[in-house]
Image (tube, rainbow, N blue to C red):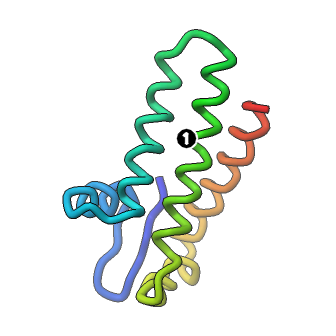
Amino acid sequence: MILVTGPYFGGPYIFFIYNALLDGYNFAIIGGAAIVSTLSCMIVNRSARKNSMRLIGVVLMFASLFVFFLPSKGYLLIYTFSQAVPLTTFLLFILIITFAIRRSI
């Protein structure tokens, strides 16, 4: 669970995805697809499909975060990288992604 902090509002990244998904933002659509792909890999029994779905989910999660922090208005979210707790959750997410990719390959 990644915590995102801004000057006025902060919270778990999944709440940002949920609220923005209703409005059709790109990062939310990508994040929603990542969640569906990751959850569906828990249902699939074949290891080859499971690994590829897990890898697709991880790549989509990273792409969603990249699109979320990339825009010019993203400078308001820079507080995420300057406070200890949100930065720790972001680094843990990177660590989990690394292990998931290594496990999928």
Q: Quadrant of residue 82?
A: bottom right
Q: Is residue 65 above or below residue 69?
A: above
Q: Position of residue 91 (x, y in %)?
A: 65, 62
Q: Quadrant of residue 24?
A: bottom left
Q: Is residue 74 above or below residue 91?
A: below
Q: Position of residue 84 (x, y in %)?
A: 57, 74
Which of the pair 1/61 is nearer the observer?
Answer: 61
Say which quadrant the C terminus sits in: top right
- Left or right relative to 86: residue 97: right
- The three-letter amino acid code for the residue at tag 1 is Gly
Residue shown at 57% from the left, 79% from the top: 81
Q: Quadrant of residue 89?
A: bottom right
- Left or right relative to 2: residue 103: right
**Which residue position is annotated with label 1?**
57
Which of the pair 24/5 is nearer the observer?
Answer: 24
Q: Callout 1 environment at 10 Å: few (<14), some (14 to 19), or many (20+)?
A: many
Q: Position of residue 18 (x, y in %)?
A: 27, 55
Residue shown at 52% from the left, 78% from the top: 70
- Left or right relative to 42: residue 88: right
Which of the pair 80/41 is nearer the observer?
Answer: 41
Q: Is residue 39 above or below residue 72?
A: above
Q: How many marks?
A: 1
Residue shown at 59% from the left, 40% from the top: 56
Q: Position of residue 4 (x, y in %)?
A: 43, 70
Q: Residue furthest top?
A: 45
Secondary element type, mark 1 = helix
